[in-house]
Structure formats: structure tokens, C-alpha cells
Amino acid sequence: MIPAIFGISGQTLSDAERNLFRERAPFGFILFRRNIDNPDQVKALTASLRELTGRDDTPILIDQEGGRVQRLRPPHWVDLPHTRSLGDLYKQDPEAGLKAVKLQTQTIAGMIAELGFTTVCAPVLDVPVAGAHDVIGKRAFAEDVETVAQLGAVMTQEFLNCGIMPILKHVPGHGRAIVDSHDVLPVVTEDKNVLEKTDFATFASVAAKVGPEKLWAMTAHIVFTKLDKTPVSLSEDMITYLRHHLGINGFIIPDAIEMEALHGTCAERAVASLKAGCDVTMHCSGNFDDVKAIAEALPAMTDKAKERFAATESARKQGATKPVWRDTYKELKSMISSDDAYVYTMHQALSVA
């Protein structure tokens, strides 16, 4: 097993993909809109991926936040409100806001679990600041640390309660980026002591509340100049800092390594992310030439990474709640009814067709 999460090109595996993955079985997979048609097709695809690896615990990931980042959409699934609407409700009525967060989480968990997904790329714990690029925007619960930390912890725990592994993103914080890391490398020059009280604080808080050994985290492709000169995802010093100073010491993966924020070939980026201390790397586009080059360049997954994954799987499998997502969605819709909260704005970089 190689330490990689791969995207695939279509709604079924190609012969080339099938042959490569038989020879170099990846740790896991991530699916996007291009891979999704209808429930039966998705169930068959997730089952075929696990059959190919020969491992029932092969993680299969999906981005399903709500708002403009959701891969499962009508008519087969529902349009979820953007995350900011949950934070707005919480500020108006804390009890109702907390309930809405749980209902959104249960709806997502129920939808993805019945399709064979085990892992969701959520919650977003970034704290946007004035003047930042809108790549985060309404994907964040709020623009204050306390609200993001509080609601982020509730969502994280609720996913675990439902047997779904959440991924905290984008550690240690994408909220100050004035450019989109899909397109160019963001550079943040703020002082470390300020960052630790703001951007970084939400991740440290959620990890401490829920238990860092239970969780996955996804790194941001950002340079924080007061800490290091290398993007977080490729920096040994930054990954060490996450684990030993912020308490983010569970299972760590990078954001998609094909994003334009990083330099070098995808194989070079993949190797660098592992050398930096990520447990596995992640390539999402489904470009077969890149996937093949990465698969051939990677060593076997380390025992330490396997141990960290096993700890998160143990936590995930303890979740006993099996939400009836159509019912939870109906209740959520009655609480957050504003049309604005459900407007889906296509963003090419985020939708990764």
C-alpha cells in the first residue's frame, strides 16, 4: 500500500487505472462531480474501489460542505446551505444555531455514508479577515475565532457520532490568504503570536476538545513567513509545529498537491509532502500520467502513519448514529429557509469537474 489518496478520471475505473491500482494499491480515494451520476452508480464505484485494494477500510473521501462546495447535488441529493448561514443563526439564537449545525452534519453524514464514503473534507475552521480572497468566504462559520471554534467542534464531534471521519481544514489557517492557493501561493506575513491567537486557535481548540488522535487534518498550501519560508504542506518544520505546538498530531494529509500554489512535478510534490511529515499525500485531478508518476515514486506507507490511521478508524467506528438524512434535511430547511443560504455559485477551481 502506498501513502496516497488519488482522484480518478471518470464514473468508473479505466483499465489503465485498474491495472495501476492493482500493482500499486493506494491508501485511499477522493471523488468529485466528474465521478458522480446517481446513487446506484456511486455505490458501485465505491464498492469497486475497495474491491480493487482488497481492504474494507480503504478511505473514500468527498468534499461536502454545503454552499458552493458540495459534490452531491440535486436531483438525487439536496442543496445544503452554506456554512456561514449556520454561524449567522448561532449568533442570533445560540441554541437554534447549535441544532442547525448538528442537522447539517447529520444530513451530510447520512447522504455520504449510504453511498460508501467514510470520510468528509469538512469542517472548514478558517477565520476569514477583511481583504482576504473569497476562496473561503461563506465556507467559514464566521469571522471570529470563538464562533468558528465552537461550531467547528460541534460539527467535528457530530460527524464522529455518525461514523464519518471529519477532516479539519485548512490547517493552520487559510483565512488571511489574499490569493487563491488553487492558482498561486499565498504568503502571510503576520506575527506568530497574533496567528496563534486567531488563525491557528480554532484548529488547536477543536483538536483539544474532540481529541487530536481521533482526527484528520488537511494542510494549507500557504507560507507563513514568521514561521518558515516553505509552504506548510511541504515543510518539515511546519508539520512538526502543527503536531507539537498546536496539538494537531493525528492523521495529516496535504490539500491537493496539483494546486498551482506548489512548484515542481506532482511526483516531486508528493514525495516532499511525505518527507515533511504528512502521513499520506493527495492528488485529486484524476490525471493518469500524474497519478502513475506519483505511484511509481512513493515508498510504502510507514508504520507510524498506519498507527495514526488505525486510531482514527477506531474513533470513527464507535459512531452509532445512523441519520435519516431526508428527515434531518427537512428540519434543517425549516430552520434556515433564506434562499440566499441555498444559492449555489459555480466556482470552477472549487468544483473540480
Image: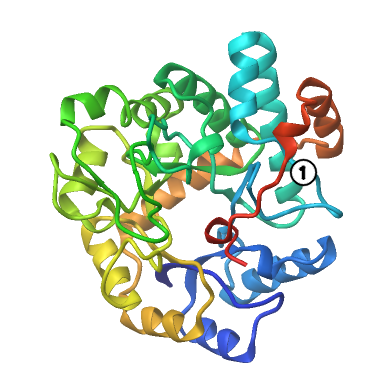
Report x, y in % for residue 248: 32, 37
Which residue is nearer to you in this view: 66 or 271? 66
Whether residue 332 is visible, yes or no, is yes
Q: Position of residue 209 (x, y in %)?
A: 43, 22
In which quadrant will I find the C terminus? bottom right
In this picture the colour scheme is: rainbow
Picture coordinates of residue 90 (x, y %)?
61, 15
Please tell me which residue lies in front, 316 or 289: 289
Amino acid under label 1?
Asp
Residue furthest out toward the front: 131
Give me the residue at 20% from left, 46% from top: 238
Residue 308 sits above or below residue 338 on the image = below
Q: Residue at x 86, y 54 (%)?
A: 75
| Above or below, 41 relative to 350 | below
Residue 189 figure quarter: top left
Can you tell which quarter of the image residue 351 is in?
bottom right
Q: Nearer the viewer, residue 6 or 126?
A: 126
Q: Is residue 320 visible?
A: no
Judge left or right: residue 290 versus residue 185. Answer: right
Q: How many marks?
A: 1
> Dot 1 corresponds to which residue?
79
Question: x and y percent of residue 157 in the render?
Answer: 55, 29
Q: Label 1's element?
A: loop
82 over 220 or under it: above or below: above
Can you say which quadrant of the picture contains the N terminus? bottom left
